[in-house]
Image (cartoon, rainbow, N blue to C red):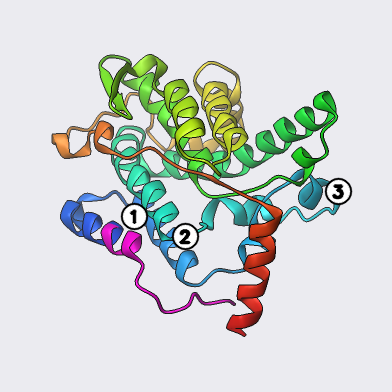
Amino acid sequence: MQRRSRTINTGLILLLSQIVHVGINNIPPVTLAVLALNIWLFLNPVKPLYESCISVEKCYQKQDWQRLVLSPFHHADDWHLYFNMASMLWKGIKLERRLGSRWFAYIITTFSLLTGVVYLLLEFTLAEFMDEPDFRRSCAVGFSGVLFALKVLNNHYCPGGFVNVFGVPVSNRFACWAELIAIHFFSPGTSFAGHLAGILVGLMYTQGPLKRIMETCAGIFCSNTGYRGQQYYFNNSGNPRNSPPPFGFRLSPEEMRRQRLHRFDAQ
């Protein structure tokens, strides 16, 4: 197991202070568990980033499917972790209280795997359609695909109102698409395909057959979750409009080589 060097992680400190400000007792259990898991794996990564990120070349061609499990829960740096987990904090509070903890855990698990699969399909399609092999090698890591899927769910359950996207008020209905474009242009190095994959997974759940498929697979478990029509009330601190946009990072070959060198230096 690779441990990160002991440097000041400002993003991690800000994230912990935000969690303390909200209050651990005010964070539902699954949301809290997701935050804890991501922080733990940031400090104690199972594998270095170049062995955790997902790409068509690594997952499909080399059959390294464990990356589908590892990639959502590893982050490139402390700021990547901060933006994603701060966003998860507010989205989790909102959605877990509405859907119930067991069904929300089911959603997180399903979305974590499915966003990776859709990402690979998008990259493979682009590589074939544009005859550009770099799309097969494009490697992504981070939780932002899942967060975009959760944003689609949240906007589905709360369709009214506006959100602020980089200083521009945007209707909740179009917020995901506005953030997708804005992050792509204003944050170089982020994974457009990874974010798009999250939106598509969210739409598969709200507009497509995914929710019914999940209910069928859940069987008896689904009947005990009580997620249908379950409503909770909480103060405005749980408003997802206060959350920063999620970010997912695409690792270039140079970054992957740098991570490899850092790993050897750490040993």
Element marked by disc 2: loop
* 219, above or below 24, in the image: above
State the image coordinates of residue 132 (x, y, percent, origin top left): 82, 34
Which numbered mark, 1 or 2, is in the foreground of this view?
Answer: 2
Q: Residues within 10 Å of mark 3 (few under 14, many from 20)?
A: few
Say the numbered circle drawn on residue 32: 1
Query: Which is more toward the observer, 160 or 104?
Result: 160
Q: Is residue 191 magenta?
A: no
Looking at the image, which residue sits at the far left? Answer: 235
Contact flag, marks 1 and 2 (Cβ < 8 Å): no
Give the side of residue 136 with respect to residue 94, left or right.
right
Name which of mark 3 and mark 1 comes first in the sequence. Answer: 1
Q: Which residues are magenta?
A: 1-14
Instruction: Identify which residue, 186 or 28, lies in the foreground.
Output: 186
Asked if 250 appears above or below 158 in the picture, the reply is: below
> What predominant SS class does the magenta segment belong to?
loop
Residue annotated with mark 2: 77
Residue displayed at 74% across by 33% down: 121
Whether residue 221 can be seen here: no
Three-letter amino acid code at disc 1? Leu
